[in-house]
Amino acid sequence: MVLSRTPLSLYVHWPYCSFLCKFCAFSKTRVTKETDNERTILALLRELETTLALHKDKYLHSIYFGGGTPSLAQPKHIGQIIERASALVPLAADAEITLESNPTMAEVEKIREFRAAGINRYSIGVQTLDDQMLQQMGRLHTGADGLAAVDRAREIFAGRVTFDMMFGFAGQTPDGWSKELNAALDHADQHMSIYQLTVEPGTPLYRDHLARRTRLPGDETQAEMYERTVSICRDRGFEHYEVSSYARSPEARGRHNTGYWRGLQYVGIGPSAHSRFVDPASGRRVREVRVPDAARWMAACERDGQGTARVEEVGEEEARQEMVVFGLRMLDGIDNRRFCEVSGGRVLEEYLCMERVMEYVDRGYLVWNTGGRDCLSHCLAPTELGLQVIDTIILDILPAA
């Protein structure tokens, strides 16, 4: 019975893109005439079988197709992966199955086919409504294309559509961002992901930034845009439940990503994909990383059944740190019961620098909830104010190395 099993998330990395965005640091390969989709799918299915063979005691509570641009794949291929995964490990009746996409016409035309293939949640990379900025970032769609794709997706995935927006582009102002966000929210469904643009090493944007060809807004301006994002979304009925995530209700929250933040087990297939799970054979928590290069990854899958670059044991100290780092991304925070499960029996007040924790509580950045009959019901969570500077807070409350 599924409910008696441990939940597991599956991430499927589709490595190909029709264009390469200036800000993207993910593993991807530009589509060419030589791109062999059939070979890629066979490699994914081979790695899927090898990977899930270790997890037959679990059940899949989410599947996420990311990339790259998985909406470039054929819907029948996406359906094959879903069907094979559910044959290997039970799929929850209410499992969330998400596909990432770009709002180009070729991809929009396949939306209904993806629904028939088993996708039940659709994520669209709109990013910005500013056509000039889209062009500068290397995108092939316009702002109008983005909103049209969202509207089309809502017809087919009613209540299960999310799309990404970003702020912090060169030349952007808080007033301009507020206007753009409100226009986007006019088309929103039940969920949105809203990110601050970050300059990732190795990207074209990073090189432009170093050469001073691109000047992004300063820290104070970015902070004001973040604050306006939270305020506008709240006024429009969206709860800010994680640093970059907004939902109209708890039921609309992204289940797959929430699993990451809560420290649940997940496996990834495809080039550069990561896994983190408890090895059934040893009982140890491990991390797996796949080969990043698509050609070498496919060759490894064909030869060995998987394209694993390395396997690392996750020690108790690292597991504790991960729980704090990821758990405090959410306004729900971390509860002692869950922390205790992954940290070798320790509780938060034994692990964290509680003097500093209470200083942040007094200043309105954290909440330390001690309700309940025992310490396992204690919970540490950021406030809205704390979420804005949570990276700094985490560094301050973790024990010294």
Image (spheres, helix red, strand yellow):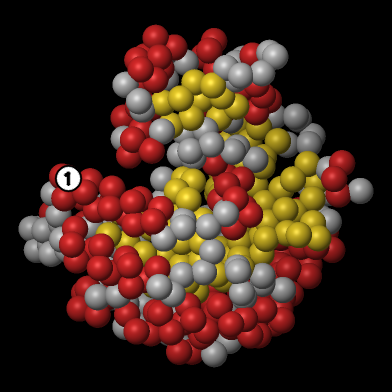
Give the answer, above or below, for where 144 lies relative to 3. below
In the rendered image, residue 198, in percent from the top left (x then y), is placed at 28, 53
Per the image, the residue denoted by label 1 is 219
Three-letter code for the amino acid on which mark 1 is drawn? Asp
In the rendered image, residue 220, in percent from the top left (x then y), is placed at 15, 45
Of 74 and 391, nearer the camera is 391
Of 364 and 375, nearer the camera is 364
**Quarter of the figure with residue 125:** bottom left
Instruction: Tell whether 225 sits left or right of 24.
Output: left
The residue at 28%/69% (across/down) is 180
In the rendered image, residue 337, in percent from the top left (x then y), is placed at 67, 24
Residue lying farthest right?
Answer: 1
In the rendered image, residue 105, in percent from the top left (x then y), is placed at 45, 89
Instruction: Tell whether 20 sits left or right of 15.
Output: left
Res 46 visible: yes
Label 1 secondary element: helix
Res 299 visible: no
The residue at 48%/38% (across/down) is 331
**Quarter of the figure with residue 394:** top left
Give the answer, above or below, for where 146 lies relative to 340. below
Instruction: Tell whether 104 sits left or right of 60.
Output: left
Give the answer, above or below, for where 87 lies relative to 56. below
Q: How many marks?
A: 1
Residue lying farthest left?
Answer: 212
